[in-house]
Image (cartoon, rainbow, N blue to C red):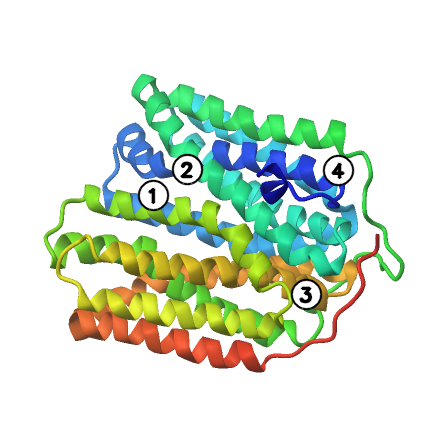
Amino acid sequence: MFRHWFPPGLPRAFWILFGGRLLNAIGTSLFFPFLTVFLHVRLGISLTAVGAVLLLLAACQSVVLLFGGVLVDRWGRLPAIIASLVGGGLLTVVAGLASAAPVIVAAIALRAMALVLANPASQALIADLVPGPRLLEAFSLARVASNTGIIIGPMLGAFLVSQSFTLLFVVSGGLMVGFAVGMGLLLRRETLPVPGFRPLERGLRHLLQVERPLYPFAAITALMYLVYSQLYWVLPGYLVLHLKAPVADFGFLAAENALFVVLLQVPLSRLVANIRLERVLAVGMAAYAVGFGSLGLWHQVWPFGLSVLVITVGENLVNPSVTTWATLVAAPHHRGRALSLLSLANQMGSGAGPLAGGFALDQGGAWGLWGSVASISVLSAILFDRVRGRTHESPV
């Protein structure tokens, strides 16, 4: 049983990072679901203004991602992770303790900018530590850690916020700093510099300088995230406004999604371990097409659980495969930039998703929305299956 979830042969450093990702996911997810309410209550602003603040956060993160990949490749993975989490954790505490609106908004914006660097840095570290044939398994396990934290975090956050928002922010920030300290103490081996590593290049054209196949791949990935964003941003509104379902019903679907990510991620990754990654991505997007396309068939809430299960299968196939493909194609000294490019694709696709989904729903109703999402999924499946790139060896 334990060999299933903790397979032998992966480096000790990976398991330390696994535990750290779990801890950090708890700290991040206990904070994020309550951010909208916090801004509304603490600042006394309208939900429209809250939306403007969230848009500001996304814009700030996108700017950091343009520069952040180069920093990960120049500083090394560990310094980038530690700086990101210490800065983000301390700024979380500042936001919770502050009372002046400008300070709160500034702290939350700077927090978002600091934390966005942690994920590509930790993914690059995993890619450096784990041999190429086991990368898909390693990234799958990392997703299990993150999603387990996402299950635990909101429940803990609900308890903390019932006591005070300040306690919520302090615990969230403390967990992030704890992760950073643990990484610094336990992971003393830095995986950079590597052979062929070059100093920080000058000029904007070098910020996202990666192997050429990664640019079209990132564009397809943005389409994938546009599709997936419908699950958490558009589906809740569709259930409540069009089907008149209780708001709580989507909570069960979200919990189902997170639970099946944890339960199915590792078995599915092992099932497809010997299949070409481009084909796995295509199959995953085909599952998205079936899952999202079927949402237009249902008029009661319970069948939506079947569609969400199919979507989750697609998610478990696509997400670790996207990261694995990018890290194998990128040269070791470009991995930070490559993974930042994928994070930027995530921002763009997820940001455009609610607008595109809302427009499709307003113009074409249920079939217009879910038919469009299924069509984009099919297109993405075809494009993923045709993309190609030369792989590079891990530096360790």
Distance between the Cα atoms at labels 3 and 4?
37 Å
Q: Is residue 123 left or right of residue 56?
A: right
The residue shown at (51%, 80%) is 383
The label on residue 204 is 3
**Answer yes or no: do the residues labelled 2 and 1 have beta carbons within 8 Å?**
yes
The type of residue carrying mark 1 is: Ala
Callout 3, which amino acid?
A: Leu
Is 186 or 209 nearer to us in this picture?
186
Residue 335 rendering spot, x and y as whole percentages:
71, 59
Choose between 130 and 93: the one closer to the eye: 130
Label 3: element kind: helix
- The residues bearing labels 1 and 4 have C-alpha atoms spaced at a distance of 31 Å
Give the left or right position of residue 140, taking residue 396 as reference. Answer: left
| Tag in front: 3 or 2 | 2
Please, is residue 161 above or below residue 368 in the view?
above
SS class of the residue under badge 1? helix
Counting residues from the start of the chain, the first of labels 3 and 2 encountered is: 2
- Contact check, label 3 and label 4, Cβ < 8 Å: no
According to the image, label 4 marks what residue? 12
State yes or no: discs 3 and 2 in contact (Cβ < 8 Å).
Answer: no
Q: CA distance from mark 1 to mark 3?
A: 42 Å
